[in-house]
Amino acid sequence: MSEEGIYRSRLEPAFPEATRYTSSIKEDSWIFYEDIEATIAHDFMLMKQGYITEDQFKKIVSAIKKLLENKELVQTDTYKYEDVHELIESFVIKEVGIEIGGLVHTARSRNDQVVTAVRLKTRREVFNILREILDLEKTLLKKARETIDVLFPFYTHLQQAQAAPLSHYFLGYFDILMRDFDRIAESLKRINLNPLGSVAIVGTSLKVNRELTTKLLGFHGLLENSFDAVSSRDFILETVSNLNILMLNLSRMMEDLIIWLTSEFGFFTLPDELAFPSSAMPNKKNPCILELARARSGRVFSSLAQLSMVCKGAPSGYVRDLQETKPPLIEAIETVKETLKIVRITVENMRENRERIRSSMEQNIIALDVAERIIEEARVPFRLAHKLVGEMVKRSLKDGRGFKNIKEEELKEVSLQILGRDISPILLNILSKSEETLVSLRTSAGAGCQSNDLKMIREREKMIEDYYSKLNEMIQRDRDAKKFLEGQVARIVEGFSLP
Ligand code: ARG
């Protein structure tokens, strides 16, 4: 039975099986601290509004402090309670009696309470994720700097396509993850809104001050409509959708690296400390971290699927279904945080095998660059240049020569055959250029070549510092709000501090 049963005013005690099935106490440990912070802010507001005296407030806060200092109280007999909200309120009532403890939940419902705590916690976890993204971004930039002089085969259809500095790959993922950062950071303006004071569904006749709790809890605005405030979980859907996109992006990068770590490619090597053995085959060195990072995108996607199922049919207003939005949110956040961290460590520590990369590169990989030179230097229509170089590749492949080694005679023949004129001196000159030179001739904005990549690295090195400062400002605003709440409460309860 719900032993404390503080909510069961009209109901007889519940069967233990019923409480166990409905209780969210396990996942509520995730919002334990935030629920307490919001409770203190709410009760402080009630005191300011004259519903609680200073003396009563002091007693309530000291009971809460006791709970905070004795974490084991939170874990014991957990299934007695429907949730952490019942646990906290019951504890205060037990400590200071119902005359005072019974004031805690004035002008509040668990419906606005739970979503307040979840929004606060999500805001903070988003900060953690944003920091992890930036740390990984920094590593990608460092990698780009280190590999700007490594000519690397870029693939389409998993067939060699064109060569460019390896830095171009790392810079590409830098930009991809920056969009993830922006998407997640941008969602904060919808996450960080205050539902508190909406009570059960349509607000209250009691004189609550929602602006004050907004300030005390560092929300940057009110979630105004009370019915919307308690009903909506789109901020959770949005967060997990964004995390899903992030994980899909990471997963694709993992797939690349796993392929490049095979002995067939051998482009990179993992240090032993980040590789795993086989129980049977003594020769094995497996990239399990990368495989798990790839696979765990599945967890985040299934969190999004779970959430979608919960939200699709839930009638508006609070329904208990909404309790089921917490576990997938927690799962997605934890998975993403851990994955970002280990991917950063892995990228930081893997080494590129320069010789292997170089020797794996097919000569034909430069074919489009050669065709472009022909267009520039002989003003040949693109389609004919394509045919011309295609013919050169075809002939050279027949006897295993690189197409750059085709003799003048044959060039002349091909040129006459395709163009009806002889441009073999121009062709000879183009073919004498090194791959590096041809790559360096790329001029389009964002093209993969050393000069572009260097420019992009420099710009992004500055940019990331701005991003760190912006994030630090956001975190500082959160800390300032907490300090403000602490300061206000400390005026009443001497020496009060939040953990
Ligand atoms: N444990 C619940 C949750 O996580 C709290 C809200 C319960 N509200 C209610 N009316 N039963 O959603």
Image (cartoon, grey):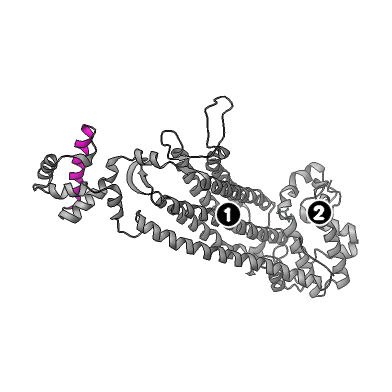
**Residue 406, placed above or below residue 59:** above
Instruction: From the top left corner, tell me how far across and down residue 293 is, in percent.
Output: 55, 43
Question: Which label sits in the foreground, 2 or 1?
Answer: 1
**Residue 374, placed above or below residue 296:** below
Identified at 47% across, 42% down, the residue is: 257
Quadrant position of ligand 1: bottom right
Can residue 124 be seen by looking at this rendering? yes
Foreground: 79 or 69?
Answer: 69
Kind of element beneath mark 1 = helix
Q: Between marks 2 and 1, how big is the CA–CA gap?
A: 33 Å
Is ligand 1 less than 8 Å from the beta carbon at label 1?
no
222 in magenta: no
Can residue 384 be seen by looking at this rendering? no
**Residue 314, placed above or below residue 474:** above
Tell me if label 2 and label 1 are in contact, CB under 8 Å.
no
* Boundaries of the magenta span: 381-399
Q: Earlier in the sequence, mark 2 or mark 1?
A: 2
- The image's mark for residue 132 is 1
Magenta stretch prevailing secondary structure: helix
Total of numbered circles in the picture? Answer: 2
Instruction: From the top left corner, tell me how far across and down residue 136 is, in percent.
Output: 53, 53
Q: Quadrant of the C terminus?
A: bottom right
The residue that label 2 is drawn on is 87
Instruction: From the top left corner, tell me how far across and down residue 408 is, in percent.
Output: 13, 42
